[in-house]
Image (spheres, rainbow, N blue to C red):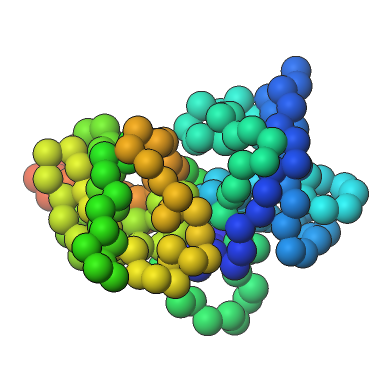
């Protein structure tokens, strides 16, 4: 589990296609042990043996995320898994990317920066104003949701410590919606009703 509070950005050292997906190597400020979970721009990956940050990215992850588009020299957001008993400063982020969004705009008005992203209906139904969302692994609060788009405000610290301030129109980003919104949607879509439970003898 993660918090969406990015610890650092890293540089892609290599992104090589293999018969099993993608071998990704990232240069970061720390090393992790084999088997450790690391969020790479919002996608939870398992570290391989050896020094540094090395991962195998499977086809399902490549399909759902932007990791397949990474190139040598590119920057990614990094966060190590939350330690037991640690303070949860962001929100509950699983590192299970739900899908991709496309940047509509990154507008600046003085110190205020608003990022607007377009998503498909399967994601839009899980996003609510003032709710939490992770964009490329960064925990953010949704400002507005309208017509398949949502916006978030980026504070100076976020611009300084993450890759979000470098985004441009058309760029693709990883989106993980709030886990609570997912459960709420599942409940709304459920066919199990009180009437059905009574008929089956459970109530």
x, y (%) of residue 160?
49, 66
The residue depicted at 26 percent of the width and 32 percent of the height is 120
Q: Quadrant of the N terminus?
A: bottom right
Q: Nearer the viewer, residue 188 or 14?
A: 14
Q: Nearer the viewer, residue 13 or 80?
A: 13
x, y (%) of residue 37?
68, 55
The residue depicted at 42 percent of the width and 41 percent of the height is 173
Question: Is residue 54 shown to the viewer in this render?
Answer: yes
Say which quarter of the image contains residue 138.
bottom left
The residue depicted at 41 percent of the width and 36 percent of the height is 172
Is residue 142 rendered to the left or right of residue 161? left
User: Is residue 65 positioned above or below 155 on the image?
Assistant: above
x, y (%) of residue 93?
47, 59
x, y (%) of residue 127?
24, 50
Question: Is residue 55 shown to the viewer in this render?
Answer: no
The residue depicted at 75 percent of the width and 21 percent of the height is 18
Count how many numbered circles sit on residues in the image: 0
User: Is residue 154 positioned above or below 197 on the image?
Assistant: below
Identify the residue at the far right of this view: 50
Identify the residue at the far top of this view: 19
Identify the residue at the far front of this view: 110
Q: Quadrant of the C terminus?
A: bottom left
Is residue 62 rendered to the left or right of residue 170? right
Q: Nearer the viewer, residue 193 or 59?
A: 59
Say which quarter of the image contains residue 165.
bottom left
């Amino acid at each position: 589990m993660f918090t969406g509070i990015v610890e650092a950005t890293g540089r892609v050292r290599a992104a090589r296609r293999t018969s099993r997906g993608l071998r990704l190597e990232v240069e970061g400020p720390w090393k992790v042990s084999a088997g450790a979970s690391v969020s790479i721009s919002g996608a939870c990956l398992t570290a391989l043996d050896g020094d540094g940050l090395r991962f195998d990215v499977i086809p399902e992850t490549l399909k759902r995320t932007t990791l397949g588009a990474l190139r040598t020299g590119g920057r990614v957001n990094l966060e190590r898994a939350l330690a037991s008993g640690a303070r949860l400063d962001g929100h509950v982020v699983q590192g299970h990317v739900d899908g991709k969004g496309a940047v509509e705009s990154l507008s600046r008005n003085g110190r205020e920066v608003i990022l607007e992203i377009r998503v498909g209906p399967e994601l839009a139904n899980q996003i609510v104003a003032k709710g939490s969302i992770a964009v490329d692994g960064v925990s953010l609060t949704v400002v507005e949701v309208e017509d398949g788009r949502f916006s978030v405000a980026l504070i100076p610290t976020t611009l300084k410590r993450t890759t979000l301030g470098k985004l441009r129109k058309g760029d693709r980003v990883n989106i993980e919606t709030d886990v609570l919104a997912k459960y709420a949607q599942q409940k709304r879509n459920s066919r199990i009703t009180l009437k059905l439970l009574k008929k089956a003898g459970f109530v």
